Image: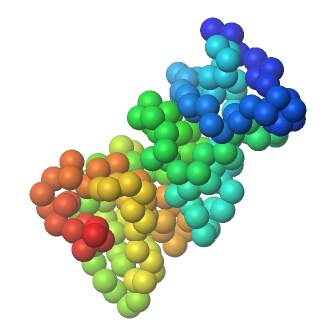
Amino acid sequence: MEISTCKVSFDDAIESKTDLNAQPINLEFSIHGELLFNCQNKKIRIRVQKCFPWSKSDGYFSLRDDQDKEVVLVQAIQDLNLKSQNALLAALEASGFCFVVTDVLSVEEDFELRLWKVETLQGIRCFQTELMAWPRELSPGSLLIQDLAGDMYYVPQVSQLKASGQKWLAAFLD
């Protein structure tokens, strides 16, 4: 596997009137924990930077090379193909603080807070959100929840949770 720098930069793309963002974005997450961008049959090592981590934590991801140059901008995870979505989510999880929720065990209200108990791929986690902070729906049936500490919890498909978990999240879906 060859890993290198993409020969087409944004400056080159502007000169040749090539829109790199119009090309399909193909990402993969390597067994070594690296996010790779497939560009012109070469794999570029990239990292994810959230453009708006507080206001748009579920979108606008700048994918940057080792020179900190933006290779491509991903506006929404659901705009990617399934393999690339999984790779980006794996990279976010590896970069820390994005847990994939496999079940919701309880959601309770207590003094302007919502107390969550969830099962994740890493085990059972308890966290708090503000009562008025609702989960963001990324695509129909998938949710992103940010806790008070800034950690992210991703529910890929509410419909794939156990019936009890679906019941806990029903109020958060349209």
Q: Residue furthest front?
A: 17
- Coloring basis for residues: rainbow
Q: Residue furthest top?
A: 1
82 vs 174, left or right, is right
Q: Residue furthest bottom?
A: 111
Residue 29, percent from left and from top: 54, 28
Observer-nearest of 109 and 75: 75
89 vs 64, left or right, is left
Observer-nearest of 33 and 166: 166
Residue 86, percent from left and from top: 45, 36
Residue shown at 21% from the left, 48% from the top: 160
Q: Quadrant of the C terminus?
A: bottom left
Observer-nearest of 49 and 17: 17
Total number of numbered discs in the rendering: 0
Residue 53, percent from left and from top: 63, 62
Q: Taking 37 as reference, is 117 above or below it?
A: below
Residue shown at 79% from the left, 33% from the top: 17
Residue 66, percent from left and from top: 79, 32
Residue 95 visible in image: yes
Residue shown at 16% from the left, 66% from the top: 167
Q: Quadrant of the N terminus?
A: top right
Residue shown at 57% from the left, 32% from the top: 25
Q: Residue furthest left?
A: 163
* Quarter occupied by residue 23: top right
Observer-nearest of 34 and 140: 140
Residue 125 visible in image: no
Q: Taking 52 as reference, is 69 above or below it?
A: above
* Quarter occupied by residue 166: bottom left
